Image (cartoon, grey):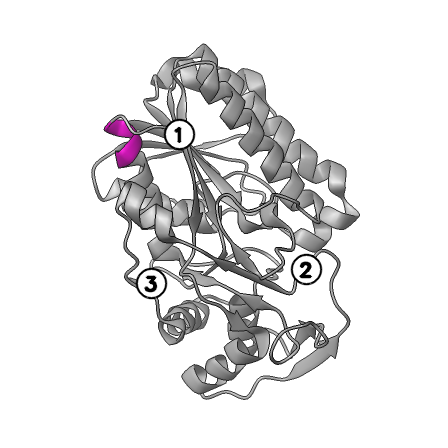
Amino acid sequence: MKILITGGAGYIGSHVVKALGTQGHDITVYDNLSTGHREAVLYGDLVVGDLGDKEKLNALFAAKHFDAALHFAGSIVVPESVSQPLKYYQNNTVNSHTLLSLCQKHAVHKFIFSSTAAVYGMPKDGVCREDSELAPINPYGQSKLMTEQMLKDFSASSNFRYVALRYFNVSGADSEGKIGQSFPEATHLIKVACEVATGKRPSMKVFGSDYCTPDGTCVRDYIHVSDLADAHVKALNYLDKGGQSEVLNCGYGHGFSVKEVLARVVEVTGVNIKIDESPRRAGDPASLTALADRIQSVIGWKPKYDDLNLIIKSAYEWEKKRPY
């Protein structure tokens, strides 16, 4: 297939580019490189551009005649979304509308959307099912949910079909060490902890130790980025075989607290990490784990890297390779 991948120079997008590239697809990455990296694009052509540039994007659609689009481009930092909400509605919602309008114009009917568990907000039992109440508590989650609604309505009115994958906490790096998480000033727990372990940061903060969880710190469902990339491949194959529009959780179905993860980082790396306890961050729910049965039954996805130590080890090996 001829595939457009927005945000394909970023962390998750680059792993999906690699997964699809190894299968021989004709890939075009569209990325403004604000947080992505040119060297992370291992397959296909890189076009540097912003999703807000509708004229440039329209010309690309007209020239390439895409069969499918995978949409990763957007802003992802929850606390920043609280302090800069309009940035998130522009990057995550308005720009998604631009992309969808061009898919409609150029008859691109297969679409994979990078959504998030943040659409669930604060579920009472901390477990998220695809049919759980959708009640985001921050602009990041709300901006993604608004795009999900656009996808639903667009699909209902046409032959456009999509899979929206609601990610849980994505971590780790490519097993071959070719790509990993290079997001500037990253806030992801395992990434930050591995930066401390390699001496790139002197210490790290734990935001809140008074949550209603077993040890008082937030609980999250951590998924290896290579498993997530494989979910996108499976989702695209599902649509290509005529599958109908779906919204699917993408996680392992079990969680670890911040303290548990940091203890595992020390175990894997052999490095004691300096930790500063800080107040809660705005927009952080106490617990989020996936009920992830449907993704396995609908698109045939089966995780291969469901091992927290393995996730941490891959992230640590990547950080050791990266320059300071």
Q: Are marks 1 and 2 in contact (CB under 8 Å)?
A: no
SS category of the residue bearing label 2:
loop
Residue under pointer 3:
177
Which part of the image, by quadrant, shows the C terminus? bottom right
Q: Could you tell me residue 178's position as x and y percent?
A: 34, 58
**Residue 285, x across and y down, in percent:** 66, 60
Q: Residues within 10 Å of mark 1 (few under 14, many from 20)?
A: many
Q: Dot 1 corresponds to which residue?
A: 245
Q: For residue 195, which quarter of the picture?
A: bottom right
Q: Is residue 240 magenta?
A: yes
Q: Image check: 246 left or right of 218?
A: left
Could you tell me which quadrant the N terminus lies in? top left
First of labels 1, 2 by sequence position: 1
Closer to the camera, 35 or 294? 294
Residue that mark 2 sits on: 284
Mark 2 residue type: Asp
Q: Residues within 10 Å of mark 3 (few under 14, many from 20)?
A: few
**What are the residue bounds of the magenta stretch?**
237-241
